[in-house]
Image (cartoon, rainbow, N blue to C red):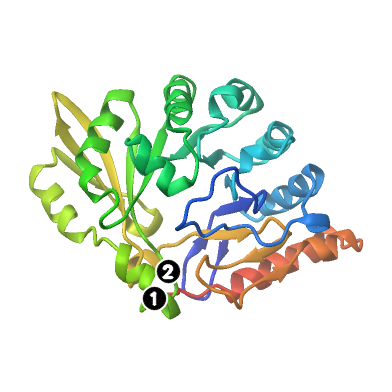
Amino acid sequence: MFIDRFGRPVTNLRISLTKECNLNCFYCHREGQLDGERRMTPEEIERIVRIASRLGIKKVKLTGGEPTIRKDIVEIVKRIRPYVIDLSLTTNGTTLYTLADDLKEAGLDRVNISLDTLDRKKYKMITGFDVLDQVIKGIKKAVKLFYPVKLNMVVMRGINDDEIWDMIKFAGDVGAILQLIEIEVPREMENSQFFRDFFYPLKPLEEEFEKIAVEIRERRMHRRRKYFLPVDGKVVEVEVVRSMHNTVFCMNCTRLRLTADGYLKTCLLRKDDLIDILGPMRRGASDAELVEIFKRAVYMRKPYWI
């Protein structure tokens, strides 16, 4: 297993399959870089995951953009399944109803589905598209096939902060886990109008959860807390993701990232940390040389908030 300079094990690889998306959420990081001729093929993704697995990276999450708009998404899942112990997907859910069965058969373990609102007009305002019913249909199918299913709600002041408890109830009704996520921006954007307008601090909400939770657990990843909340006779699992200025969050990060155009990336918020792995691979690099590229990426890892 890789351990970086700060004593953090590297066990997870987050792979952006494309920068493209069929929605247009105004707050999105769009984790992919440039597509085009640099887009990784299923065979190239498989090779990178195989090497990562040899180095102790056994958990892979597929992201985008929207990963399911790749026509070869099922093939990608099938190819990398043998090398990992946990294979998950983050999706906006728009194609999930159609693809869920094939993804399950290919070996996908679990899914995270972005859902910021239960209000149809708000959903269209946030994403640019009127497809909320389609997404909810996909969620209801996903919970029958995958475990766990997590709903990702980015909480935004003045937009959906009034829906938090409705979303908790919805998660309980469908049998999903809810992740409440703060807006996250790099340091240079903290004074931006966007951040000032929409950042909604979740710490007060966590303090409220602490008083009513029937159980509280802590995840190893980022030391995030999970609250088990009594709601309408059910116990709903709610996880709170607060990364801004959170040194504990960063010191417990176990991820490397792989961009859609084949660069290893050590941190979502950094812009100076791209290490090309696809280019050398296409120029004939051996597995041993690719291992060295992984080692360089791990060495470069540094907590963003420290």
Give how far across and how far down residue 77 sits, in percent: 67, 35
| Quarter occupied by the N terminus | bottom right
The answer to which of marks 1 and 2 sits earlier in the sequence is 2
Give how far across and how far down residue 149 sits, in percent: 42, 33
Give how far across and how far down residue 54 sits, in percent: 69, 51
- State the residue at coordinates (67%, 69%): 295
Q: Which mark is residue 302?
A: none
On the image, which quarter does residue 157 sit in?
Answer: bottom left
Report whether residue 294 is seen.
Answer: yes
Q: Which residue is mark 2?
A: 185
* Contact flag, marks 1 and 2 (Cβ < 8 Å): yes
Q: Which residue is mark 1?
A: 192
Name the element at disc 2: loop
Characterize the local packing of mark 1: few (<14), some (14-19) or many (20 or more) Cα atoms within 10 angstroms.
Answer: few
Query: Relative to the observer, which residue lies in front, 103 or 26?
Result: 26
Query: Relative to the observer, which residue lies in front, 122 or 91?
Result: 122
Q: In this view, which residue lies farthest toward the right?
A: 284
- Give the residue type that dot 1 points to: Ser
From the viewer's perspective, is the residue at label 1 or at label 2 nearer? 1
Report whether residue 1 is seen.
Answer: no
Name the element at disc 1: loop
On the image, which quarter does residue 185 sit in?
Answer: bottom left
- State the residue at coordinates (30%, 46%): 239
Q: Is residue 55 left or right of residue 136?
A: right
Characterize the local packing of mark 2: few (<14), some (14-19) or many (20 or more) Cα atoms within 10 angstroms.
Answer: some
Give how far across and how far down residue 97 sits, in percent: 54, 23
- State the residue at coordinates (44%, 19%): 144
Query: Relative to the observer, which residue lies in front, 104 or 185?
Result: 185
Query: Relative to the observer, which residue lies in front, 197 or 271?
Result: 197
Height in image: 113 above or below 9? above
- State the residue at coordinates (88%, 59%): 282
